[in-house]
Amino acid sequence: MPNMFACLVYIQQILVLEVDDSHNDCALRKGRMIGRLIQPQRIALFSAFSVLSNGTVSYKERLRSGLVGIKKDDAVDLFESMVRCRHPLPSLVDFSRLFSGIARTKQYDLVLHLCKKMELQGITHNNYTLTIVINCYCRRRKLGFAFSAIGKMLKLGYEPNTVTFNTLLNGLCLEGRVSEAVELVDHRMMDNGCQPDEATYGPVTNRMCKSWNTASALDLLRKMEDRKVKPQVVTYSMIIDGLCKDGSLDDALRLFNEMETKGIKPNVFTYNSLIRGFCNAGRWDDGAQLLRDMITREITPYIVTFNALIDSLVKEGKLTEAKELYNEMITRGIDPDTITYNSLIYGLCMLR
DNA sequence: CTAGGGTTAG
């Protein structure tokens, strides 16, 4: 009976969570409305500015300040005003800024469309705009067109550089074509005298770890070191996560210690992967030790960290310890979510 | 001046 009561308390907490969510939603909607309301004022201000400056710097000003989260209509409008403008004549740098701004809002087709319109105006691409084009094709999973853009680049007399290769490489990884990606780095990229950097190996490592190929990811890590590219925390974290999912906890720990000796500080992701790995292996005590470790090192645990530990404690029948952790997360100001309560409720139901 | 990348829970 007391367990039943505790269950109800937790279920009530879930209901409170959902109410909070709807509040957030309301707030969001309100925010959007306010955004819409102030829009005309912004336009009015902008026109005033244009008139003041005789219409000469309007697109420059918009490029400088109005690209974050730009909508389709505004983007097309800005593009048209650039194409029409003669004083000053927009440069390719201006177009690069516009295209990259739109690309950041993930409207890749729009970027490609505007690029075509730019070409029709007799404006020729350079290395920068073509790399943006390559990225857009890659994101739309049209690798064939991305490779054609490389051809265009060569025809115009530009050499693909590290960024160009990295962009293409990411495209291959997005499609799961990891071996081709490795081939591209080892041959085309290196042979062309392009030095790989930390952005070269990130997507490759990610894809390898995601497809349960941590052994290859480890090989790649050694290759990076041979090529004097310093792996970053995120690279180590991805591999450690892969090893933990494989159940190779000792290897994961070895890598964890290795990054320490190299002066690379683990972060909350690194710890979470390890804690989850140990918990899944039933080694909740080691998991709890790691949690204490991260707290002493002032790496703030996330809700994920606590959830993993609570869940594993519950499955071990250590309900008291699980509840202690639940209380600790509350005192730390971390709001439990449905996953937290699910674990606790499960534990209470199993107790009987 | 302007281009590219990657990580956690039931």
Image: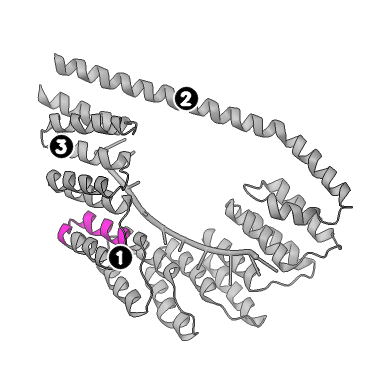
Q: Identify the residue shown where x is 22% and y is 55%.
A: A244
User: Label 3: which residue?
Assistant: A313
Same chain check for tags 3 and 1 = yes
Check disc 1 and report its element: helix, strand or loop.
Answer: loop
Name the image quarter holding the C terminus of chain A. Answer: top left
Which amino acid type corresponds to the residue marked 3 in the rendered image?
Leu
Secondary structure beneath label 2? helix
Residue for point 20% across, 50% down: A277
Label 1 environment density (alpha carbons within 10 Å; few <14, some 14–19, many ≥20): few
Magenta stretch, main secondary structure, is helix
The reply, left or right, for residue A97 in relation to residue A328 is right
Q: Mark 2 lies on which chain?
A: A
Classify A5 as above or below A108.
above
Q: What stretch is highlighted in magenta?
A: A236-250
Residue marked by disc 1? A263
Chain of the residue displaying label 1: A
Q: How crowded is mark 3: few (under 14 residues within 10 Å), some or many (20 or more)?
A: many
Residue A29 visible in this rendered orientation of the protein? yes
Say which amino acid is labelled 1: Gly
A218 inside magenta stretch: no
Query: What secondary structure is found at the residue carrying circle 3?
Result: helix
